[in-house]
Image: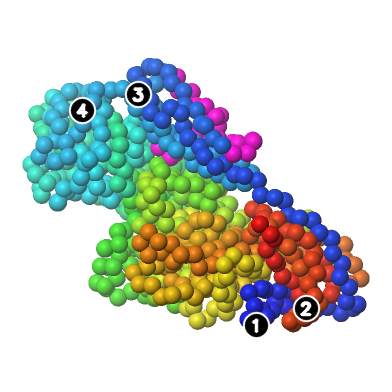
């Protein structure tokens, strides 16, 4: 049988196999492949292009890293199909070509998002006003203008535009020169915009006529409404998630006696239990000849032509995006914004396409205090985490990515969805995507994660592939598990944001989001006090370890800062770092420092390697007369693997060989049928 032992008073962790037969050490060593350098820097040249209409321009990536770099260009964070060269050619610049451009630069070892460059279409500069009463006046039938919102603010009493968190609005006032149907859009803007149109004389008495987030494409916005000659309309343009920058405002009035249908109540997203019934409905201003057509994931639903749509016995095939097109007797139509249907335990909680759609922290705690709730269920659109919480949410991945959203865990994505988790008590939280229909990547951030700032990225943890057990990784017919899993120590009162993306930005399949929450007292953990730089820990996959900062003189007004591979682990400020249910991706170089003002005191470090002892039959190799095993592992850095038949103060440790760092678990090819103890030792620098 396999055993794992911890020698009392030691910082080393060993494995041994007990089997029948002669005690013989058989070893063949193949060092793990060395880490190859992933891209280290990438920028777009030139960083700013002011391009007249119908001109041509060229943007190129300047990247450093290994040979064989791959590229995927994006505009405003959205992948540009087919644009995979180091340079992007833009022929005959149109308004829609304006935007923020970057590229995802990848090689076999990782992914890096380049810095952004702006392609600004050279239109007349006419910025909107920061204040509603000072709205910039425009009156033409059609026009395209350019503006900036770097210093714009949000006013007291200002409406919530299109239901999103925004804070940098600018205002225009447009007087309709004739009656008809008017279209305003922000196509060509270099930021993620939201637009809304209102009638009324002051902020307290505005009536929304239309609002939108992304109908313009590439995170730009588009609205239409019925305009009356001589009427004054107020148009607000804002950046989503506090984005600022250069925007375009385009409008065109179609002078016609026709009118658009007016929708007064849109279908709303829903979360229901599996097998339950979901109902969507739309309300339109009555007029003769109105017709309705419902759509599911972009496909029309035959026979679904009533104002209400019923989906009975909701299952996997029911999940996704629902919209309805409303058409009047003159043939004019409008289509409602997307409404998502998901399966989950709480009707208030659904995945969100953007951080700006997440509930703000004040609404979370206000809702929590205003009403009782079931254990582990949502409050104000967030999941509450208490001991015993189990959450299973299933959704259709029709997401996009925010303009400045990083490649989570260094993996190219493009279809992310967000959940908000609130820890009501301290505990161990495990989040995974087991049961998803697509290869996923999972990341966890603190609530104060701001998409478009690079000053601080509060990443708690991330994972691409769980990979699974030995048979799944090593056997000839094995298939590594491509779902994702994160386990971390949650702190009471902390708000976390979990994001699930599909590798490569694959859309159109269902994703499973699972959460399990338990008390820390139920976790058996290996306690290790860190020394200067000498700790080399060998841990079994699935075990837990707690790293403790070396004792030091007590200091006031300071905090601990834990890092892994040079990255700060967000949300951990105490003298202990608990790593529960280790996976291969948790292997790394951990360190802790004490910070007081500008003074940082180093308190210790450790390299954690994670291994699985694999029985020989799991590797698909022929069985010998004696049952043997091998080590499948990921080393934190270059270490020496040693073995001993005994475990005491007089143990004679024999070097098996050097193990090099690797980005994926590799077979260490330690083959033995004896009872041996293993340890890792740091190599000399």
- Foreground mark, 4 or 3, reads 3
| 27, above or below 677, in the image | above
Q: Could you say where residue 45 lies in the image, as x and y percent from the top left?
A: 46, 28
Mark closer to the observer (1, 2): 2
Q: Is residue 394 left or right of residue 55?
A: right
Indicate left or right for 178 with 595 as reference. left
Furthest residue to the left?
Answer: 201
Q: Earlier in the sequence, mark 1 or mark 3?
A: 1
Earlier sequence position, callout 1 versus callout 4:
1
Q: CA distance from mark 3 to mark 2?
A: 72 Å
Identify the residue shown where x is 65% and y is 82%.
8
- In the displayed structure image, the side of residue 294 where residue 74 appears, left or right: right
Q: Residues within 10 Å of mark 3 (few under 14, many from 20)?
A: few
Relative image position of residue 470 (x, y in whole percent): 72, 63
Between 345 and 609, the one nearer to me in the picture: 609
Q: Is residue 582 visible?
A: yes
- Residue 73 forms part of the magenta stretch: yes
Image coordinates for residue 91, horizontal then vertical, percent: 45, 19
On the rendered image, what quadrant is the C terminus found in? bottom right
- Looking at the image, do the residues carrying marks 2 and 4 touch, with CB atoms under 8 Å apart? no
Q: Residue at x 74, y 71 (%)?
A: 678
Q: Which residue is mark 3?
A: 50
Nearer mark to the viewer, of 2 and 4: 2
- The N terminus sits in image quarter: bottom right
Magenta range: 65-91
Marks 2 and 4 sit apart, C-alpha to C-alpha, by 80 Å
| Residue on which disc 2 sits | 651
Q: Which is nearer the eye, 285 or 363?
A: 363
Earlier along the polypeptide chain: callout 2 or callout 4? Answer: 4
Q: Is residue 393 above or below residue 287?
A: below
**Would you name the residue on which mark 4 appears?**
126
* Residue at image mark 1: 8
């Amino acid at each position: 049988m396999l055993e794992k032992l911890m020698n009392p008073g030691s910082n080393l962790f060993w494995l041994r196999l007990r089997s029948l037969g002669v005690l013989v050490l058989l070893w063949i060593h193949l060092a793990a492949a060395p880490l190859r350098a992933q891209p280290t820097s990438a920028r777009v040249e030139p960083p700013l292009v002011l391009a007249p209409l119908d001109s041509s321009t060229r943007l190129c990536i300047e990247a450093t890293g290994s040979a064989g770099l791959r590229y995927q260009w994006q505009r405003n964070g959205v992948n540009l199909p087919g644009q995979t060269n180091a340079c992007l050619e833009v022929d005959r610049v149109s308004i829609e070509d304006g935007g923020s451009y970057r590229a995802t630069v990848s090689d076999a070892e990782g992914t890096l998002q380049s810095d952004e460059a702006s392609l600004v279409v050279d239109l007349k500069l006419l910025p909107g006003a920061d204040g509603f009463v000072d709205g910039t006046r425009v009156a033409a039938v059609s026009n395209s203008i350019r503006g900036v919102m770097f210093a714009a603010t949000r006013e007291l009493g200002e409406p919530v535009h299109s239901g999103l968190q925004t804070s940098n609005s600018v205002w225009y006032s447009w007087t309709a020169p004739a009656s008809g149907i008017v279209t305003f859009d922000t196509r060509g803007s270099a930021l993620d915009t939201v637009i809304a149109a209102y009638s009324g004389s002051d902020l307290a008495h505005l009536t929304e006529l239309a609002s939108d987030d992304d109908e313009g494409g590439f995170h730009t916005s588009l609205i239409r409404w019925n305009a009356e000659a001589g009427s004054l309309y107020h148009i607000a343009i804002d950046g989503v998630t506090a984005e600022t920058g250069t925007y375009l405002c385009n409008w065109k009035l179609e002078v016609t006696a026709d009118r658009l249908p007016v929708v007064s109540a849109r279908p709303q997203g829903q979360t229901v239990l599996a097998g339950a019934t979901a109902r969507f409905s739309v309300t339109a201003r009555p007029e003769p000849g109105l017709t309705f057509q419902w759509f599911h994931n972009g496909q029309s639903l035959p026979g679904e032509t009533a104002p209400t749509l019923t989906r009975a016995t909701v299952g996997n095939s029911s999940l996704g995006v629902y919209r309805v097109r409303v058409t009047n007797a003159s043939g004019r139509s409008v289509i409602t914004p997307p409404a998502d249907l998901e399966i989950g335990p709480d009707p208030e909680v659904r995945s969100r396409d953007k951080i700006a759609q997440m509930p703000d922290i004040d609404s979370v705690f206000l809702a929590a205090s205003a009403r009782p709730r079931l254990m582990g269920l949502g409050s104000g659109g967030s999941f509450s985490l208490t001991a015993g919480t189990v959450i299973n949410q299933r959704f259709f991945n029709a997401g996009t990515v925010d303009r400045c959203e990083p490649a989570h865990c260094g993996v190219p994505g493009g279809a992310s969805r967000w959940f908000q988790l609130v820890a009501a008590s301290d505990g161990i939280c495990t989040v995974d995507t087991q049961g998803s229909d697509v290869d996923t990547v999972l990341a966890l951030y603190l609530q104060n994660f701001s998409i478009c700032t690079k000053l601080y990225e509060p990443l708690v943890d991330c994972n691409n592939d769980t990979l699974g057990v030995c048979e799944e990784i090593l056997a000839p017919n094995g298939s590594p598990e491509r779902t994702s899993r994160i386990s971390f120590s949650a702190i009471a009162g902390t708000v976390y944001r979990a994001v699930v993306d599909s590798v490569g930005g694959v859309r159109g399949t269902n994703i499973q989001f699972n959460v399990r929450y338990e008390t820390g007292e139920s976790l058996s953990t290996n306690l290790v006090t860190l020394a200067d730089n000498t700790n080399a820990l060998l841990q079994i996959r699935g075990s837990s370890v707690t790293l403790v900062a070396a004792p030091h003189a007590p200091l006031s007004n300071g905090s601990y800062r834990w890092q892994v591979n040079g990255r700060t682990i967000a949300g951990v400020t105490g003298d202990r770092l608990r790593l529960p249910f280790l996976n291969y991706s948790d292997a790394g170089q951990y360190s802790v420092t004490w910070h007081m003002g500008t003074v940082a005191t180093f308190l210790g470090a450790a390299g954690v390697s994670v291994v699985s002892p694999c029985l020989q039959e799991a590797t698909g190799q022929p069985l010998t007369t004696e049952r043997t095993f091998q080590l499948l592992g990921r080393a934190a850095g270059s270490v020496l693997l040693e073995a001993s038949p005994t475990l005491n103060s007089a143990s004679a440790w024999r070097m098996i060989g050097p193990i090099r760092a690797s980005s994926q678990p590799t077979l260490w090819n330690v083959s033995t049928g004896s009872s041996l103890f293993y340890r890792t030792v740091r190599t000399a620098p």
